[in-house]
Image (cartoon, grey):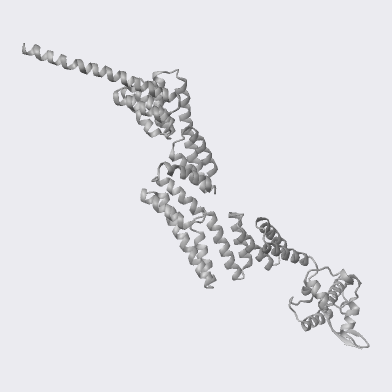
C-alpha cells in the first residue's frame, strides 16, 4: 500500500509539470510567430527580442536558435549568430538550415575552411540543396583568393593583394582580417584616406583592435605625421605586446624622426658634411616611407647645393620628385640648381611645373627669370667670347679685347690654311662684336637685360671689326704683324 501511495504521489506531481511544459511550448510558439512577423517587416531588433523569449521558454528547440541566428545575421552580428547556429545543429544535427547558417556565418567572418565543412554537411543531408551548392563554391572561391593574395604579398604586388581582398570581402563582409590586409596594402599604395576609412570602421566596432590601430598608425607614418603615428603604434602594442608589425613600424618611426631631426640640427649649425651623413642614414631606414624619404632626398639635395655639388643636388631632388611628384620644394630646389649650372631649359620646365601647381607672384617671377636666362643663353655669349666675368669692369673688358683681338687678327694667320684663316676671321669679328656691345653702357644694359639688340639702330650686322680694331689701337700709320720666328708674330705700329 505504501508503494502504491508513493506512485500515486509521483503521478500527481507530473501532471501539472506536463501541463506547464505544454503551456510553455504554446507560449514559445507564440513568441516565435511574433518574431517571424517582425522579421518579415525587417524589424530585426524586435524579431531578435521575441526569438530570445521563445528560447527562454524552450531552450532545446533548434529552430528557435536557427531563427535568432538568421536575425543576428541580418543585424550584421555574425559572431553571435554563429553561436546560435552552432547550438541549433548541436540540438538537431539533421537541421539543414542550421548547417547553412553556421556555414554562412563562418564564411562572413572569413573562415572559409570551416564554412566548407558546414556546407558539406548540409549537402550530405540534402544533396540537391541549391543554396548549399552555391555557398560551397563561394567558400572555395574565398580560399582561392587567399592563396593568390599570399603569393602576391610575397611579390609585393600590392594592387593584386587589394584586388583579392576586395573579391574575398564580397563573400566575407565581416572578416576583420581581410579588411586589415586590404587597409595595410592600400596604405602601401599611398591610398591613405581609403586605408584610414577601413581601419576606422573596424575601430568603431572594436576600439581595442590592435591591427586596426596599427593600420591607423601606418597611414600617419607614411604621411610623415610621425609623432602621431608612434602614438597609435604604442596603443596597438598595449593591446597586443607581440604585434610584430607594430613593433617594427614603431622602431622605424622613432629612428626616422631622430635621424631627420639630427640632420636638420647639423644643417642649421652649418655642419653640412654631418648633415649629409645623417640624411643618408635616415634614407636607409625604411624604403617604403615615400613622403618622408622624398623630404630626406630634398634635404640632402639642399646640403649638396651648399657643398657646391650641384649635379648631386639635382640627382637628389630628382629622386625626391620621383617619390612625390607634387613636392613643390624639391622642384624649386632642382630648378635653382639647374639655373646655377646654366641648364636653363630644365629650369624653365621645373618652374612651369611649380607655377601650374601654385600660381603665386613669386613663382611667376622665378619662371620669368628662367625664361629670360634661357632666351639669353641662345644668343652669343659676349662675356665668354672675351673671356671675362659678367661683372667685369671697363678696364678688364678693354684688356680682354686687346688680348683676343690680337690673338685672332687675320694678318696674324695669313700663312695658315684657308680653313684656319676662315675660322680665325670669324672669331676676330665676334671679339669685335662683343667689345662693341660690352664697352657701350647703353648696349651692355640692354644685352644684360635680355632685350633685342637689333632694336633702336643696334643692328650687329652693320659693324666692321677692322674699324673697331683700328679705333681701339689708334696710330696714324696703323699696324702690321711681323714674323719673329717659326710660328711667332709681333705687331708693329707704323
**Residue at point 43% right, 18% down?**
127
Asked if residue 236 is positioned above or below residue 64 in the image, the reply reads: below
Q: Would you say residue 414 is visible in this rendering?
A: no
Residue 66, position as x, y percentages in the image:
37, 25
Q: How many marks?
A: 0
Residue 65, position as x, y percentages in the image:
35, 25
Q: Would you say residue 357 is visible in this rendering?
A: yes
Asked if residue 255 is positioned above or below residue 184 in the image, the reply reads: below
In the figure, is residue 156 to the left or right of 427? left
Asked if residue 106 is positioned above or below residue 421 in the image, the reply reads: above
Asked if residue 375 is positioned above or below residue 169 in the image, the reply reads: below
Res 42 quadrant in image: top left
Res 118 quadrant in image: top left
In the figure, is residue 29 to the left or right of 451? left
Q: In which quadrant is the C terminus drawn? A: bottom right
Q: In which quadrant is the N terminus drawn? A: top left
In the figure, is residue 386 to the left or right of 134? right
Res 24 quadrant in image: top left
Residue 351, position as x, y percentages in the image:
68, 60
Amino acid at each position: 500500500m505504501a508503494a502504491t501511495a508513493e506512485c500515486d504521489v509521483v503521478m500527481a506531481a507530473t501532471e501539472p509539470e506536463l501541463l506547464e511544459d505544454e503551456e510553455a511550448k504554446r507560449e514559445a510558439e507564440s513568441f516565435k510567430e511574433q518574431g517571424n512577423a517582425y522579421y518579415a517587416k525587417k524589424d530585426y531588433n524586435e524579431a531578435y527580442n521575441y526569438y530570445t523569449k521563445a528560447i527562454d521558454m524552450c531552450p532545446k528547440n533548434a529552430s528557435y536558435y536557427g531563427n535568432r541566428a538568421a536575425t543576428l545575421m541580418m543585424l550584421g552580428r555574425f559572431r553571435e549568430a554563429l553561436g546560435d547556429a552552432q547550438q541549433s545543429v548541436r540540438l538537431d544535427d539533421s537541421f539543414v538550415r542550421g548547417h547553412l547558417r553556421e556555414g554562412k556565418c563562418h564564411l562572413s567572418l572569413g573562415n572559409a575552411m570551416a564554412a566548407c565543412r558546414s556546407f558539406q554537411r548540409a549537402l550530405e543531408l540534402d544533396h540537391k540543396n541549391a543554396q548549399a551548392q552555391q555557398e560551397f563554391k563561394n567558400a572555395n572561391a574565398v580560399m582561392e583568393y587567399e592563396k593568390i593574395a599570399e603569393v602576391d604579398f610575397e611579390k609585393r604586388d600590392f594592387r593584386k593583394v587589394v584586388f583579392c581582398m576586395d573579391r574575398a570581402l564580397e563573400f566575407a563582409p565581416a572578416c576583420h582580417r581581410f579588411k586589415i590586409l586590404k587597409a595595410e596594402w592600400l596604405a602601401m599604395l599611398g591610398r591613405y584616406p581609403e586605408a584610414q576609412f577601413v581601419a576606422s570602421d573596424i575601430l568603431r566596432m572594436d576600439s581595442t583592435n590592435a591591427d586596426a590601430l596599427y593600420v591607423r598608425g601606418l597611414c600617419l607614418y607614411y604621411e610623415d605625421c610621425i609623432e602621431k603615428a608612434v602614438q597609435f603604434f604604442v596603443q596597438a602594442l598595449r593591446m597586443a605586446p607581440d604585434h610584430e608589425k607594430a613593433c617594427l613600424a614603431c622602431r622605424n618611426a622613432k629612428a626616422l624622426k631622430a635621424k631627420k631631426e639630427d640632420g636638420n640640427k647639423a644643417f642649421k649649425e652649418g655642419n653640412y658634411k654631418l648633415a649629409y651623413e645623417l640624411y643618408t642614414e635616415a634614407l636607409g631606414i625604411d624604403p617604403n616611407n615615400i613622403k618622408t624619404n622624398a623630404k630626406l632626398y630634398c634635404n640632402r639635395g639642399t646640403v649638396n647645393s651648399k657643398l657646391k655639388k650641384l649635379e648631386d643636388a639635382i640627382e637628389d631632388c630628382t629622386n625626391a620628385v620621383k617619390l612625390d611628384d607634387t613636392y613643390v620644394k624639391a622642384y624649386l630646389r632642382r630648378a635653382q640648381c639647374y639655373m646655377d649650372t646654366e641648364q636653363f631649359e630644365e629650369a624653365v620646365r621645373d618652374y612651369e611645373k611649380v607655377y601650374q601647381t601654385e600660381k603665386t607672384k613669386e613663382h611667376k617671377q622665378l619662371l620669368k627669370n628662367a625664361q629670360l636666362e634661357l632666351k639669353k643663353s641662345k644668343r652669343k655669349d659676349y662675356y665668354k667670347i672675351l673671356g671675362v666675368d659678367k661683372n667685369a669692369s671697363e678696364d678688364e673688358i678693354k684688356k680682354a679685347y686687346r688680348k683676343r683681338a690680337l690673338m685672332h687678327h687675320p694678318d696674324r694667320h695669313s700663312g695658315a690654311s684657308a680653313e684656319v684663316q676662315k675660322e680665325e676671321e670669324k672669331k676676330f669679328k665676334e671679339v669685335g662684336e662683343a667689345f662693341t656691345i660690352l664697352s657701350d653702357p647703353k648696349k651692355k644694359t640692354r644685352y644684360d637685360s635680355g632685350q633685342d639688340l637689333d632694336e633702336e639702330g643696334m643692328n650687329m650686322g652693320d659693324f666692321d671689326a677692322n674699324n673697331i680694331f683700328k679705333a681701339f689701337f689708334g696710330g696714324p700709320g696703323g699696324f702690321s704683324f711681323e714674323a719673329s720666328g717659326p710660328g711667332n708674330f709681333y705687331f708693329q705700329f707704323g
